[in-house]
Image (spheres, rainbow, N blue to C red):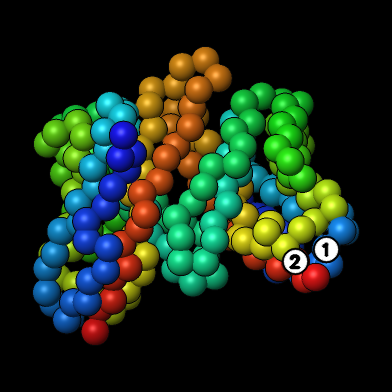
Amino acid sequence: NAGVTQTPKFRVLKTGQSMTLLCAQDMNHEYMYWYRQDPGMGLRLIHYSVGEGTTAKGEVPDGYNVSRLKKQNFLLGLESAAPSQTSVYFCASKPIPSGSYNEQFFGPGTRLTVL
Amino acid sequence: ELKVEQNPLFLSMQEGKNYTIYCNYSTTSDRLYWYRQDPGKSLESLFVLLSNGAVKQEGRLMASLDTKARLSTLHITAAVHDLSATYFCAPLIQGAQKLVFGQGTRLTINP
């Protein structure tokens, strides 16, 4: 199993450009999440999904859109990138809680710089 | 809104010493996660604490949860250099299955 993978690993954008980050998981998890991590801060939730075809806003959703057309994929889009979106983006997935099993798994991260 | 505070935010200690990282959170949550992050890397799951009074140990790390006090602790025993990393706690918002992360504690262990 590859677990949670993210594409790309690094990207540099100019202000106003758009891009899509792809998260894929092969563990058949229902829940998927997008976080951003800025220096000296913990992870902040951007958007999340509780199942295929569903999305919901997290703590810092402005400037981002998401889609979950397939259960295994969760896409994060930036329509018009701004320097404030320079960050490291992490995707995570989690199964439906079952007894004591409730672990959330993280992808390797995408480092995005907006100039 | 669930708020999470970790302290200390920075901790420099000597090998062989013991120390505790504290994680306080503001509203009810009966599950809490601890993660480790090495520089430039992703988050690695350390512990999932599922109920009040839960205690889990792995090597030199031991985590506990007191849901009534809204407090979790991560205790380091006889620290070694390999434990140098940033540690995050994250209580779970039950209904939404969302985690809220603390700011992280950057731990440096010196020989």
Residue contact between numbered discs 1 and 2, judged by CB atoms under 8 Å: yes
Q: Quick one: quadrant of the N terminus of chain A?
A: top left
Disc on the earlier residue, 1 or 2: 1
Q: Is residue B83 left or right of residue A106?
A: right
Circle 1: residue type: Glu
Letter of the chain that mark 1 sits on in the rendering: B
Q: Is residue A76 left or right of residue B57?
A: left
- Residue A81 spot, x, y in % from top left: 19, 72
Classify mark 2: helix, strand or loop: strand
Residue, far top = A99
Q: Evaluate whether residue A7 shows in this view.
A: yes
Q: Which mark is residue A65?
A: none
Q: Nearer the viewer, residue A101 or A2?
A: A2
Location of residue A115 in the rendering, given as x and y in whole percent from the top left corner = 24, 84
Kindly identify the residue that appears in the image at 48 percent across and 32 percent down: A103
Q: Is the residue at mark 1 from the same chain as the one at mark 2?
A: yes
- Picture coordinates of residue A42, whole percent (x, y): 52, 59
- How far apart marks 1 and 2 lie (CA) works out to 6 Å
Q: Is residue B86 above or below residue B45?
A: below
Q: Is residue A35 above or below residue B39?
A: above
Amino acid type, residue under disc 2 in the picture? Ile
Residue in the image at 42% along x and 40% along y: A105
Q: Which mark is residue B15?
A: 1
Between residue A91 and residue A26, name the one nearer to us: A26
Write down the residue under mark 2.
B109
Across and down, in percent, residue B55 comes to 75, 30
Q: Residues within 10 Å of mark 1 (few under 14, many from 20)?
A: some
**Local secondary structure at mark 1:** loop
